[in-house]
Image (tube, rainbow, N blue to C red):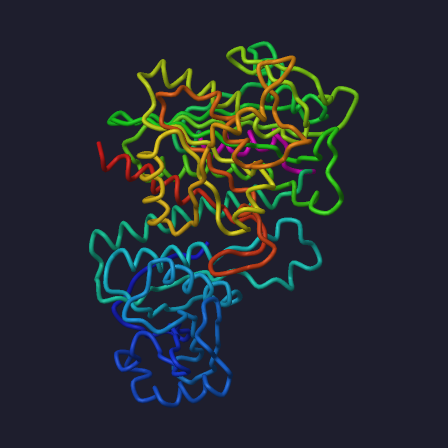
Amino acid sequence: MATLKSSPQASGEVLVLGLSAKAGKLTIHPNVEHIPALAADTKKLLTILGDLGATGKLDEVTKVSFSAPRLVVFTGFGTTAANYSHETLRRAAGAATRALAGQESAEFALPISSSAEFAAVAEGIALGAYDFTEFRASSKIEQKAPLKSATIVSNLGNSVPIKAALKRAEILGRYVAITRDLINNPPSHLTPITFTAQMKKIALSLGIKVEVLNEVQLKAKGYGGITSVGQGSANPPRLLHLTYSPAKAKKRLAFVGKGITFDSGGYNLKGIIGMADMKSDMSGAAAVVTATFAIASLGLPIAIDTYACLAENMISGDATRPSDIITILGGKTVEVLNPDAEGRLVLADGLVRASQDGARNGGLDGLVDVATLTGAQVIALGTRTSAVMTNNEDFRTLFLEATGISGESFWPMPLPEDLKEVLSSASADMINSNPANTNGGMLVAGLFLREFVPAETPWLHLDIAGSALTHEAHGYTPVGGTGVTVRSLLALAELVVSQS
């Protein structure tokens, strides 16, 4: 992860500038007249950029060898405008950072006029400075290490908001990187047990209370969803419960994450295409856990209970069969017609447990579950936009305000009452999914989960099936696990605190 600092002037060997275009005319941001080393070279730089075919489009990075500085890097802002969104700044800074792998340090002179814009640039750098080389052997030497140090050139000084922005960006970079690492780890190494052990160590170092339920305890205590999904695997399931409870907390949230460390589909076996990506089916659990770490690291005065529902969905003589009936924590019965709709089963246990604990603590101000839940989400919204469903429009509005701060893309989806009939069972309280009727699959999954949330509890269901893993790097996002939702959950917690 890159170390971050600020400076009023640029004096290093590697300098990052912005580049945009309108009607074929390139514009450099900020105006290089304010950078002494380049003040006399604006026309020369524009000529070089034109010769190189630079367009200034988003995610485009153009490197120009120079004298002083030694290297000038132009990162695309898109169409020339008077002002650029925070996400454009974040994305441009991240794209440049990824392109600077192998460099020790760089200075980022981008158009910054506020602490919020400064924060966006800092976050882009922190998120872009990532790689995953844990399992490389002979090829590791060929990999260029991420940018190690970055200085953000700004005249905002070393004020309290700037110091806070640097600290927050570094914390986000650290925990998004851990989220990505978890997702990128192969299922041979990341199991419910190893996930729990790794996260427990970090949690305890932050003063977060940890509870772990093993497979025997889960079965004995009635966690029928997690038990049924995990019982076919040689790697037994776990429930990881984290409690961050600062003394001055006035609000309480609960996070629940789907943690399927590998999803074969069970007896509804998946095809070969896409099965390798099922190591990412624990992205929701990773996100809620690391978001909790970020909240604790910043010392936010809000109580958080987090539940990572961990299992491996495999085939064996012990695996759940189509038409088996299970009992979720709390007593509701579910006929499992589709063993590949397993995420909602483990989440159901987690949602009930979170609601029970919340009631014992005086109620929840919000309950959020995060899951790579449905292929239907990808069909509806693609691979960069996630879905949000809710039983409380005010809570959803607050969350969407948080995504406006984080830059993560979420889109509100409905929970139509007429689709509830799809979940009817002739033998149990409900079915988990009907393979013969896949219409509105994302929404039906949300309706299933709503059955396990008290009506009075503000609840959000975040389906990140498309956005949790990418095969194409873009902006500050590398190939592999993206770490989506960590930033939005932190921003949500900050907004809830601000309303206290």
Estimate the x, y position of residue 452 in percent, counting from the top left: 48, 20
Q: Position of residue 218 (x, y in %)?
A: 58, 15
Region rendered in magenta: 188-203
Left or right: 278 in relation to 492: right
Residue 82 lies in what quarter of the image?
Answer: bottom left
Residue 201 among magenta residues: yes
213 up-or-down from 128: above or below: above
Q: Residue at x 66, y 30 (%)?
A: 312
Give the position of the C terminus as an image quadrant: top left
Task: Give the image location of residue 443, x and y in percent.
Answer: 52, 34
Q: Is residue 204 left or right of residue 144?
A: left
**In screen coordinates, is 209 left or right of 445?**
left
Taking 301 as reference, is 352 above or below it? above
Residue in view at x 47 percent, y 58 percent? 476
* Predominant secondary structure, magenta span: helix
- Seen from the viewer's position, the closer of residues 195 and 220 is 220
In the visual, does 496 lie left or right of 267?
Answer: left
Q: Residue at x 58, y 28 (%)?
A: 310
> Of all residues shown, which one is farthest toward the right?
317
Residue at x 37% of width, y 69% of height: 107
x and y percentages locating residue 179 in the rendered image: 51, 43
200 in relation to 220, above or below: below
